[in-house]
Image (spheres, helix red, strand yellow):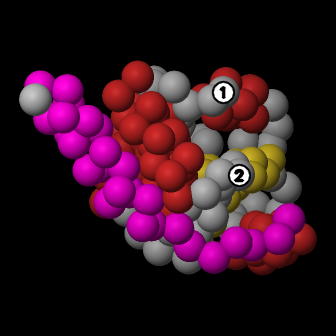
Amino acid sequence: MKSIKLLLVALVPLVFQACAASKNLTHNDVVRTALIKCPGPEMNISMVPSRGPLADAMAISAIKTAGNDGGFSKEFATFIKSDPKNVSVYCPNSQKLEALILHTFSLYKNNELKGISVCVIGIANSQKLTTEAARTGVVLTFVP
């Protein structure tokens, strides 16, 4: 009986998170969107793949519970150490993208990311991301 409850507790969030996936943009579309709608003509672009609803839901859970972001935070750290300080990020699954960015921002102190610009492609707006960006000093742009 206890194992059934544990299984239900683990699977219910996965089912609800699996429902949020947006349209897939091609690499060219992401680059074009970043160049046209994101601030700064030069930037680093990170394209996080979607592995399907169930795999993405499991990845989101891993990010939120264990901080396992598959190396995204290390890639972000590399980007902000180099010039330009503009970073554009895209993932077909907006919830996965939000979880990755929230986790990454949580690794930095207040105002530690001043001078960094992050353009989030595929999310219309996120109050959680806006709050974390303000705390860390990031200039955040949403491109739905």
In reply to whether residue 7 is colored magenta, the answer given is: yes
Q: Which comes sooner in the sequence, label 1 or label 2?
A: 2
In reply to whether residue 59 is colored magenta, the answer given is: no
Q: Is residue 71 visible?
A: yes
* Residue that badge 1 annotates: 71
> Looking at the image, is mark 1 or mark 2 nearer the viewer?
2
- Indicate the quadrant containing the N terminus: top left, top right, bottom left or bottom right: top left
Residues drawn in magenta: 2-27
> Helix, strand, or loop for circle 1?
loop
Quarter of the image for residue 73 reads top right
Q: Nearer the viewer, residue 117 or 20?
A: 20
Give the residue furthest to the front: 1
Give the residue furthest to the left: 1
**Image side of residue 68 versus residue 87, left or right:** left
| Mark 1 residue crowding within 10 angstroms, few (<14) / some (14–19) / many (20+) | few
Residue 19 in the image: state x and y as whole percent: 42, 67
Residue 83, numbered label? none
State the CA–CA distance, disc 1 to disc 2: 13 Å
Vertically, is 90 above or below 131?
below
Residue 35 in the image: state x and y as whole percent: 81, 69
